[in-house]
C-alpha cells in the first residue's frame, strides 16, 4: 500500500509519460534496485578481496601495468560472470560492471 504522497508521485510519473501504469513503474523500480544490489555485491566482493590480499610491495604503476596485461591476455575479469549478471539484472548493470576504470586506461 502506498501513502497518498507516494501515490501522487507514481501518478505524476505516469502523467509525464515515463510509464504507462503503476505496475510498469513498480517493475522499473524493482529492476533498478536489483541492478544496484548486484553492483554493490560486486563492489563488496572486490573490497573484501583487496583486504584479504594484504599489503603489497608493488607500486600503483606496477599494479596497473599487471592489470592491463591481464586484460590484454584474458579479457575483462568479469567476462565470465557478465552473461549471468546481464541476464539477472539487465544490460545497464552489465555495462557498469564491465566498464574500464580511468586509472586502467593508457596515458600518453
Image: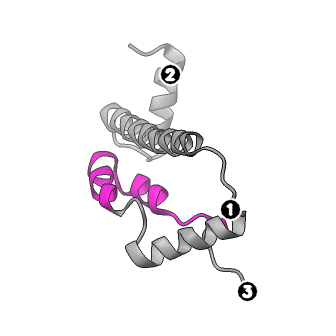
Q: Residue at x 61, y 73 (%)?
A: 65
Q: Earlier in the sequence, mark 2 or mark 1?
A: 2
Q: Is residue 68 above or below residue 87?
A: below
Q: Which mark is on residue 58?
A: 1
Q: Main secondary structure of the magenta part?
A: helix
Q: Which mark is on residue 6?
A: 2
Looking at the image, the residue that sits furthest to the bottom is 108
Q: Tell which tag, 3 or 1, sits nearer the viewer.
A: 1
Front-most of residues 27 and 3: 27
Label 1 Cα neighbours within 10 Å, binned few <14 / some 14-19 / many ≥20: few
Q: Is residue 102 visible?
A: no
Q: Earlier in the sequence, mark 3 or mark 1?
A: 1
Q: Give the residue number, with chain letter if any, for mark 3.
A: 108
Label 3 Cα neighbours within 10 Å, binned few <14 / some 14-19 / many ≥20: few
Q: Which residues are magenta?
A: 80-103
Q: Tell which tag, 3 or 2, sits nearer the viewer.
A: 3
Left or right of residue 37: residue 22 = left
Front-most of residues 68 and 3: 68
Q: Residue at x 54, y 68 (%)?
A: 67
Left or right of residue 86: residue 51 = right
Front-most of residues 79 and 39: 79
Helix, strand or loop at mark 2: helix
Do the CB atoms of the residues marked 3 and 1 lie less than 8 Å apart?
no
Amino acid at each position: 500500500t502506498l501513502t497518498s504522497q507516494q501515490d501522487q508521485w507514481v501518478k505524476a510519473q505516469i502523467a509525464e509519460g515515463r510509464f504507462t501504469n503503476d505496475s510498469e513503474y513498480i517493475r522499473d523500480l524493482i529492476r533498478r534496485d536489483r541492478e544496484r544490489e548486484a553492483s554493490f555485491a560486486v563492489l563488496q566482493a572486490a573490497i573484501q578481496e583487496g583486504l584479504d590480499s594484504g599489503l603489497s610491495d608493488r607500486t600503483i604503476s606496477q599494479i596497473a601495468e599487471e592489470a592491463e596485461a591481464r586484460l590484454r591476455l584474458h579479457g575483462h575479469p568479469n567476462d565470465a560472470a557478465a552473461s549471468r549478471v546481464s541476464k539477472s539484472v539487465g544490460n545497464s548493470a552489465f555495462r557498469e560492471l564491465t566498464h574500464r576504470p580511468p586509472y586502467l586506461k593508457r596515458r600518453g
